[in-house]
Amino acid sequence: MSGASGSAEPVAAPEPEPVAQGGEVRVFEELRPLLFSIAYRILGSVGEAEDAVQETWLRYATAPNPPRSPKAFLSATVTRISIDVLRSARVRREQYVGDWLPEPLLADPYEDPERAAELADSVSMAALLLLERLSPLERAVFVLREVFGFGFPEVAEAVDRSEAACRQLVVRARRHMAAGQARFEADREERDELAARFFDALRAGEVAGLRELLSADVQLVGDGGGKAPQLSRTLVGAEPVARLLAAYVGRLSLVDASCEAREVNGGPGAVFRDRDGRVLFVWALDVVDGRIGTVRSITNPDKLGHLGPVGDGWQVAAEMQERQREERRRQRESRTP
């Protein structure tokens, strides 16, 4: 008691306990690249993978007792969360407008020199689309075992199945993946040289040069999700694809759009931006038998936000049409005596 009034002094509330100790935060941050890479390969979505990692952190931070193996606990947790997310995502993808493609990834945050080949192969657009053929359980088991090299006891614990069941899941997954693998993919140096020639011919509008670099049955696939300009159907064949690509990039130059060659999902690709530097779309190229076998174009703005500010594809398309009309009008006037 103090003071003339005799009233009690307010008692300070105790400081809240930190959700996680500094060591736990440090361990999680060290493992974050691995967790994201697992989630991305299971989900094919950067945004969903980041959300899965964040949910994993919340479960780790609020666990009543620290796990004996943080890596095992966190890997199992992010896998289970990703499986649940994928099951609900499958329903949305069945209702998706047009072709569905994975969200483009410019850099995989996880590195492991001993598994560099598996990591690079598994993050390609082609591999992620093959993984879409698997059930969520098959996909998760394949990613943990074949890509990241987890032992079967760890895999079994992560997906809450027996080791024998996980071995069967891996066998089935391998069979599905092998059935859809490319015939032959160029080594990195050849691939990068081919991509450089492709973008040089593209910028120059050289249809013949582009045609020579495309496989006879090349496919141009677009994913706008109904939210951006996109192809009405997949275009097939070197001649029509070369002509469309050259014409389209030529029209983009009329509105000062830029093409920035980048590695996309471990392979050659490019990020296209409007005059203000906002992302319009991303291309990912597949190289097969020394030629470009597939050009995948992701224009859905929902899949580009992690790359920076996103431009308005519809507005750019309208401006391209207007500039084309102006160009034709000038050409007609120049021919008028």
Image (cartoon, grey):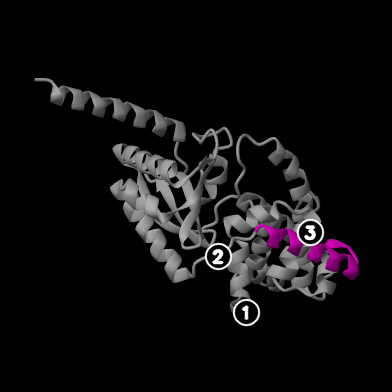
Q: Which percent across, then down, holds residue 262?
A: 43, 58
Tag 2's secondary structure? loop
Disc 3 residue crowd, few under 14, some 14–19, many 20+, Cα 10 Å = many
> Start and end of the magenta stretch?
159-180
Q: Quadrant of residue 80?
A: bottom right
- Distance CA(mark 1)–CA(mark 2): 23 Å
Residue at figure coordinates x 72%, y 74% from the top left: 149
Residue at figure coordinates x 40%, y 62% from the top left: 194
Q: Amino acid at mark 3?
A: Glu
| Disc sitting over residue 114 in the figure | 1
Q: Amino acid at mark 1?
A: Glu
Q: Earlier in the sequence, mark 2 or mark 3?
A: 3
Residue at figure coordinates x 74%, y 67% from the top left: 144
Asked if residue 155 lies left or right of residue 262, the reply is right
Q: Which percent across, then down, holds residue 284?
A: 50, 53
| Image quadrant in which the N terminus is located | bottom right
- Distance CA(mark 1)–CA(mark 3): 24 Å
Name the residue tied to disc 3.
Answer: 138
Q: Which percent across, then down, holds residue 321?
A: 35, 28
Q: Main secondary structure of the magenta part?
A: helix
Q: Which percent across, then down, holds residue 74?
A: 75, 66
Q: Name above or below for residue 46 compared with residue 62.
A: above
Name the residue tied to disc 2.
Answer: 184
Tag 3's secondary structure? helix
Which mark's residue is nearer the viewer, 1 or 2? 2
Q: Is any part of residue 256 visible from this angle?
A: yes
